[in-house]
Amino acid sequence: MPKKFQSVSGMHDIFGLQYEYFEKIREVVKENAKIYGFEGIETPVLENIDVFVRSVGELTDIVEKEMYTFKTKGGDSVALRPEGTASVMRSYIEHGMYTRPQPVKFFYFKPFFRYERPQAGRYRQFWQFGFETIGKGGPLVDAQIITIVYNIFKELGIKGAFVQINSMGDDKCRDEFKAELRKYFRKNTSSLCADCKRRMKKNPLRVLDCKKCIKIKEGAPQIVDYICKNCRDEFKMVLEFLEEVGVPYDLNPFLIRGLDYYTGTVFEFFASQKEEDTPLAVGGGGRYDGLSALLGDEERPATGVAVGVERTALLMKGNGFSFKEEKPPVFIAQLGDLGKKKCIKLFEDLKKAKIPVAEAFGQDSLKSQLSRASKLKSPITIIIGKEEAAENRAIIRDMDSGEQDKIKLEEVLKEVKKRLKKLK
Ligand code: HAM
């Protein structure tokens, strides 16, 4: 027997109910993107590796441990995109989008790649939807981005979603904070993991993001004590705007985020599958005014968010999201070669008349076809067997009463329309 293959570890197939959740999420994201004025963007799966090293940051877990990288035959170093913001900014700069009316607002829904340890809700290929606003910004934009995601969760039936929020200050106030952090960590070097001993010197903020060095963080200085008046005022405004639209938030002075490009407001969304469960981190984002400069352009105000689609689907399932039952009004059943021929044509005729039809053309037994029809709860079934096909007729069956009539094939469309009108 030849070897049976499995999908690559951490990468999964999407089908069945999970596919339905994905499609529903995509639909709601697209609707909201339209309402809030975001246009779609598709960027390549591969980027020059430096797009991520410079923006996400060389000391982050994503860049140090999780990127899929390789050299092309032409010798270019490329990476499978681990996130979307850097690519969108690269595209904005490359195409000189600063000449358009600002801000430029993009949304996306696509797969990303991180070499993480696979577990429930964590994959090596995972999907995100995201919103990015580039070119003009401020507290109002920050608050609106958060509101959009909150609304999307509500529309998807996810109850009790909340946002944790913090301000990371601008370059100046953060430098002062970093110096204090460095001092603190230097005093406690023996409690740091090997990675953090190295990270502490170049970027002590990354220690705050380390999953191993939890204890030492407790006594560490907090960014709130270092942010300047301007950053503080802006942050207060974001909170006021959120209160205005009724988005619940928790202040989390330790929230730093695992990517280097943030400045000012940062936030993370949480929600639970069941009320009693520990909340799951489902999305995050913030201001990234400095990212364009890291990619070689001048500074451009920007805010964005990305949300994990698999995790959103898990939350929908846990919160009992129910799909509207869509029963196709007509089912077509066939028997015999001539019956098949008439049925494939009838299917196309009904489709042209914009009447949703279902079939089980892969089944030969009439019994199996009718059982599929009753599962789908179609009110009308049309049967063309050998005899009917030879007479150029069809049986039209009312699935509720079981009554059936034989009618001429050319009258089927008219009769179906008449019956559907009565059913409305
Ligand atoms: P992030 O926090 O790295 O942010 O990812 C956002 C969300 O993607 C996470 O909250 C999680 O739901 C999902 N996610 C991340 N990694 C995995 C994984 N391995 N498996 C399943 N889901 C995962 C960003 O990516 C930023 N680009 C967000 C952003 C947009 N900031 C500004 N604009």
Image (tube, rainbow, N blue to C red):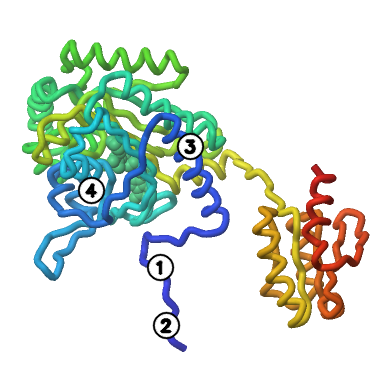
87 left or right of 187 in image: right
In the current view of this chain or complex, which residue is farthest to the front? 410
Q: Indicate the secondary structure of the residue bearing disc 1.
A: loop
Closer to viewer: mark 2 or mark 3: 3
Disc marking residue 382: none
Which of marks 4 and 1 precedes in the sequence? 1
**Ligand 1 is found in which quarter of the picture?**
top left
On whether ligand 1 comes within 8 Å of the CB at mark 4, the answer is: yes
Q: Which quadrant holds residue 239?
A: top left
Which of marks 3 and 1 precedes in the sequence? 1
Disc marking residue 31: 3
| Nearer to me, 160 or 104 | 104
Q: Which residue is mark 1?
A: 7
Task: Indicate the amino acid at tag 2.
Answer: Lys
| Residue 348 vertical placement versus 215 (above, below) | below
Position of residue 164 measured from the top left corner of the image (x, y, whole percent): 36, 26
Q: Which residue is mark 2?
A: 3
Write the residue at 42% across / 32% down.
149
Q: Which residue is mark 4?
A: 62
Q: Residues within 10 Å of mark 1 (few under 14, many from 20)?
A: few
Write the residue at 29% across / 23% down.
166
